[in-house]
Structure formats: structure tokens, C-alpha cells
Image (cartoon, coloured by chain):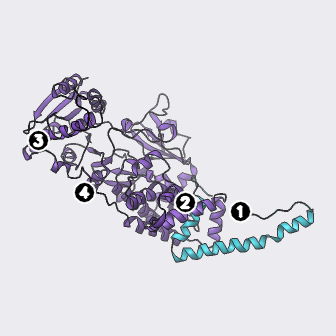
Chain colours: A cyan, B purple
Amino acid sequence: MNLAYLDAGSGSLIVQALVGGVAGVAVAAKLYWRRLTGRFRRQPAPRAAEQSSGGQSAGSQSFGEQD
Amino acid sequence: MVAPYPAPATRTTAGTGLRVDPGSFRDPTNQVLHVDGQILRGLDPAAAENWRRLAGNDFFARLVAEGKVCGTEPVDPADVPADLVGRWSTVLRHERIPFVSYPYEWSFGMLRDTALLHLEILRAALPAGFTTKDGSAYNLQWRGAEPVFIDVGSFEPVRDGEPWAGYRQFCQTLLYPLLLQAHLGLDFQPWLRSRIDGLEAGQLRGLFGGTRRFRAGVLKHVHLHDTLQARYADTSSGSVRAQLKDAGFSRDLVLATVGSLDRLVRRLDRQPPASHWSGYRETCTYSADDRTAKERFVVEALAGASRPGRVLDLGANDGRYARIAARYAGHVLAVEGDPAVADQLYRQLRADGERRIQPLVMDLADPSPGGGWGSVERASFAARADADAVLALALVHHLAIGRNVPLPAVLDWLVGFLAGAGAAGRLVVEFVHRDDPMAVRLLANKSAGLFPDYRRAEFERLLEQRCVVQHRLELPSGTRTLYLGTPRG
């Protein structure tokens, strides 16, 4: 259970990886890589939905909105 | 947040001595309460479970034993005040902090040492499986010139794979004010006083353009931080936490971040221009005879029948009289308007391991107002600063001539600090005559005839209206007079 009462801030969480030295930069690189590949991987899903329903396109989404 | 002494006006449960601390509401899992002079903390079931784990941990016991975390003990369930039974799962009792002060009343060295202590506590907690929920400068207080972490409710078990939740708050209330002073030479106190949550990365970024961005810590903690905050403004911190964990963020990385912050803060220092007040005591008009007479007067005023609990030294300068006062009193607040002079005093007191003299930075013509929610989340200086004795040495002329405060108002204000002490209170006040070189210098900057009442006879008349003058002494130079007064009932 997450007991945080404070909004830690998404950017403030990510920047800590870059403050933490080489190992942190590796984590940040991995985070970005996963976000990037995640975007490509997720693309077929809306198309499938579009084809089956014939409805409107989900359109392109920003990283943030995917989450 | 440990509450002020004396207590500011706030919510009180009718018919009981229970008062909820007005500065303790942000974390709903626990709350600081004042009951019959005790500082208690109520914990909800989740916070109580954290406490049980924390209390059994060696790192916590060690930090308390070293005085780095305030003394804390559970209240026996049989002794929990009736008003709290059923409301809180567990109740803790905290050590009382002599005087609650705020970061905008601290000098650079004080803020820096609180930042280092916060990081030290985190470095001790992390290997033991704990972290702090937040990273606020308001988590810390002072025993004299020694910082102490007071927010025991902030400790919680660390969740592996997550960065420190308090990092942003640490930047806003500790790191950024230090960067402002160390790199730009700007006093941080007014910034913190006007913004309860501290400075934003975006605000600071504007001040660190050009080559200034390459100063220690600025590129990462300010520019990059601001960029990422803007870029991820619409992404929930929950999803970012999950992604960082997935990408391999580890507890070691949190420790590396904290270590990097520690190294950065240690590199920061203030490089003040020589303040015109520095060395004031040496360069002013005091002769050695004056100084000796003045010191003896202060000793005799404070070494009287009852030992003062707290002495307020207003305009403390290099702390000479605060140190004398500390021999005869439980606690001395050394209030100094010049941040550089206060910082110098703090560093000396800290080096001496002084635990009964607390320096404070404050312009006495503009003391701290109430702040935060309802203007009571942070209490005004007037609501906190009661005393058994007040030292106002070489001060009145600065307020009356330098700042145009009418003499009756200056005296009302000085006597007001002694309201709780009544006739046992002691006011030691120095009147600098019109012909004293310092008064002459101040008067020369104002129109002639602007202060016709600034005369010794008028000062004495006003003082005697408010106090019984027990003792008076004209210093050998003949241009300054000291008075010891006790307030009239």
C-alpha cells in the first residue's frame, strides 16, 4: 500500500535516476527504451479495435496519456 | 511538526487541555497534539504499524541517542487522554523543543546543517529498510545550535525500486535556498518566508541562465529537474514509480542520489561581502570601560532571585551578551537582523557545541508574520516569543531613529514579550543618547527635528510608565544609559 501523502512529482522521480550516477543513467535509458518500444508494441491494439468496431481511431497518444 | 511554545491561538477542544497543532495536518495518518503541556502525536493504524517497526530498529534508537532525532516514547494506553481514546490507534509523546523556529528565520549555515542532517538520517534509515515520506526543512528544529529531526511520523518502510518521495520537497525548501545564497549571494530568508512550500525549479531556473547554469548542482537539480517536471506534468507519479521499478531502480540508487546531494550541499557555502555590522562591537564607540560596566550590569540583572527560563536577546550581534545570559538562563534566543552576522554567530556556537543559545535571523522592525493555511500553520514570532527576560542592548535607537518607530511603541513591544512573566520579568534596555556618535550618525540621515522626543528624559518617563526601574547605570562614556525594569502589573 502506498502511504504517500505528498505528490512526489513525476519529473522529480525521474530526475533522481540521472542524479544517481552511471547506474542511474542506465535505469533512465532503460526507462526511455521501454517507453519507446512500448509505444510501438501498443500500436497494433487500437488498430485491432478500430477494425473490429469500425469506430473512431484512438489516434496517436503521448507517452503521458498512455499511462 | 512540534508545536510552538507558547502555543499560538488555535483549535482547542472545549473543557480540555487538548489542542491540535495548526501546523500538523498535511499527513492525515498522524497528527501533533498539545495536551496539558505535553507534545503528543496520534497515529492511525498504518502509522502505528510503521512506528512499531521503527521503534524496534537499531538505527532509530541510535539517532535518538545521538540527539539527531527528537526523543519519542509511546504513551501507555492507560494514560492516553480521554479525548484521544478511539481517535488514534497509538499515541506517542515527544521531547519538548525549546523554541519552534522556521527555516526563514535561520542563517545559511543553519539551513545547510539541517539539510545535511536530513540526508544523514536518510542514509542511516535506508540500509535499515526505512525512508522518509517527505524532505521538508520544516522536519527539523533546534536545540540551541544543534539541529534535530522532529517529524517521527515521516519514517516509513522503504518500498524497493522507488526513488525518494521527498526529493522535490528537499530541493524546494533546502537545496534551492542554499543554491540561491551560495551561487548568487541572495539571502534566501524572504523567499522561504513568502512561499511555505519553498522555491520551484522553474522559478530558480530563471535566475540561473547563461553560464550560471554550470554552477555546482544547478544543471541537474534545477534545469533538468524543471524540464522533466514540465515534460511529465500529465503523467501520474504512480505510473512513473512503476516504470522506474520495472527499469531496475534500486535502493542503492536512492542511496547514490542521497550521497550525491550530500556532497553537493557540503560544497555550498556563503561568501558574504564584509557586512557593515560584522565587527560592530569592536568598531563602535564602546570603550573597554563601557564594555566591562555593561557586562556587569547584564550579569547583575540576570543573576537575580529567580532563574529566567528564556532570555530574548534582541539585536544579538556577535552574541557576547547572549553567552553571558546563557550562564543564568535555561534558554537564550539570540535574534539578529543581519543574516551574515547571525551566520557567523551560529558557526561559533555550533563549533562550541552550544545547546542553549539559538540564533535567529530576523529584522526586528519586520518580525515573522503568521503563515500558511489560515495564517496559523506557521505561527508569528509575536505568538511564539515569550520570555522571562529581554535584552535590548544598542537596539532602541535603531528602531526609533533608523526605522521611525515611536518610542512608546518600542517600549510596549519590549514589555509585551514579558507578559507571561509578569512582575518577575526583567527588561534590560540601553538608551543611546542623542549625542552618542552612533545616534548622531543615524540622526544625520533624517531631517533635523524629526525626533524631538528622542531624549533620555522622555525615554525614562515612558519606561517608568511601563516598568519599575530597579537599576540604572550611565556608562563611563557618558552617552549611553542602561536600565533594568520589571513590568508593572
Query: What chain letter is assigned to the residue under label 2?
Result: B
CB atoms at circles 4 and 1 under 8 Å apart? no
Amino acid residing under circle 2: Ala
Q: Relative to residue B427, is residue B245 depicted above or below?
A: below
Does B12 sit left or right of A37 as displayed?
A: left
Amino acid residing under circle 3: Arg
**Residue A67: image tag:** 1
| Residue beneath disc 3 | B296
Whether residue B390 is visible to the viewer of this picture, yes or no, is no
Amino acid residing under circle 1: Asp
Say if labels 4 and 3 share a chain: yes
Q: CA distance from mark 1 to mark 3?
A: 72 Å
| Residue beneath disc 2 | B165
**Mark 2 or 3 closer to N-term?**
2
Q: Please state the horizontal and vertical placement of residue B480, each as a whole percent of the image.
A: 13, 36
Q: CA distance from mark 4 to mark 3?
A: 23 Å
Q: CA distance from mark 1 to mark 2?
A: 19 Å
Q: CA distance from mark 4 to mark 1?
A: 53 Å
